[in-house]
Image (tube, coloured by chain):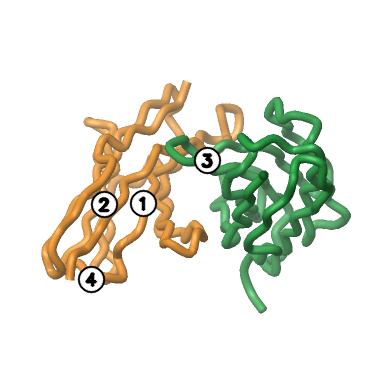
Chain colours: A green, B orange
């Protein structure tokens, strides 16, 4: 298995639910990223991890909680989300931080009811 | 601040026609990197090309070609003999070298539809 994988691919949750998105990269990269892609908006960088340390948190609400247990795995824990959080959540990885090419996973399409 | 503009929101062409997607960027840095990604309906962003600001050579890869012109701050993407499988949203992106704004800044994308 190669590249960046994300599970689940689709998720529907209520505002009171707690769920987690998972990302796994098989590229031996050291940096991982979470992006949010909403309709009609540019991709928004949410969190960045380099060697399992969080290096960027772009003013993301606390109802989104990232976790990076090792350099191959990245999670996004979700709780008490709002309908406006419905979006495509994309994970990416790169060999080094930022200016190296980022490779993306297929995304999780999240719908908050 | 860095910025990427893709003025074409949507383009439709008939199969086998050539099509050019425009990308104009802004940066204060002299060293930067430009990218193109393809996002098919499945959602995954597929990396197409990365270009270093010091390398202005045009690049061709099969039916794809890229025209990088620093004088006009443009990095345009041409698909020749388009195919239905080329239908997707295409994003241009920019990042600056370490010391600058290294975060990947994306344009708003161009939705390309190839009509059979």
**In this figure, which residue is indicated by the disc labeled 3?**
A38
Q: Position of residue B14 (x, y in %)?
A: 13, 64
Are the residues flagged by discs 2 and 3 in contact, CB closer than 8 Å? Answer: no
Quarter containing the C terminus of chain B: bottom left
* Side of A28 where B115 appears, left or right: left
**Tags 3 and 4 both on a single chain:** no
Chain to which mark 4 belongs: B
**In this figure, which residue is indicated by the disc labeled 2?**
B77
**In this figure, which residue is indicated by the disc labeled 4?**
B83
Pair 1/3: label in front: 3
Categorize mark 2 by other alpha carbons within 10 Å: few (<14), some (14-19), many (20+): many
**Tags 2 and 3 both on a single chain:** no
**Tags 4 and 2 both on a single chain:** yes
Are the residues flagged by discs 4 and 2 in contact, CB closer than 8 Å? Answer: no
Residue B65 drawn above or below residue A14: below
Q: Position of residue B74 (x, y in %)?
A: 27, 37
For the point 46% across and 35% down, the residue is A41
Give the SS element for disc 4: loop
Place residue A78 in its image quadrant: top right
Give the SS element for disc 1: strand
- Alpha-carbon span between mark 3 and mark 4: 27 Å
Find residue B90 and name its label: 1
For the point 75% across and 55% down, the residue is A21
For the point 83% across and 42% down, the residue is A53
- Alpha-carbon span between mark 1 and mark 4: 15 Å
């Amino acid at each position: 298995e190669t590249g960046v994988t994300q599970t689940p691919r689709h998720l529907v949750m209520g505002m009171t639910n707690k769920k987690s998105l998972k990302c796994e990269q098989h590229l031996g990269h050291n940096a991982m990223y979470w992006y949010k892609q909403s309709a009609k908006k540019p991709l928004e960088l949410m969190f960045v991890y380099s060697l399992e340390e969080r290096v960027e948190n772009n003013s993301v609400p606390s109802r989104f909680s990232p976790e990076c247990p090792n350099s191959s795995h990245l999670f996004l824990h979700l709780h008490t989300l709002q309908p406006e959080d419905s979006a495509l959540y994309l994970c990416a990885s790169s060999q080094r931080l930022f200016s190296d090419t980022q490779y993306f996973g297929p995304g999780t399409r999240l719908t908050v009811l | 601040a860095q910025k990427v503009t893709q003025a074409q929101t949507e383009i439709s062409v008939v199969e086998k026609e050539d099509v050019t997607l425009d990308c104009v960027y802004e940066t204060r840095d002299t060293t930067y990197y430009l990218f193109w990604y393809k996002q098919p309906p499945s959602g995954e962003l597929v990396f197409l090309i990365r270009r270093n600001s010091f390398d202005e050579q045009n690049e061709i890869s099969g039916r794809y070609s890229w025209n990088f012109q620093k004088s006009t701050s443009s990095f345009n993407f041409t698909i020749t003999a388009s195919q239905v499988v080329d239908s997707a949203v295409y994003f241009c992106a920019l990042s600056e070298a370490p010391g600058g704004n290294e975060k990947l800044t994306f344009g708003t994308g161009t939705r390309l539809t190839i009509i059979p």
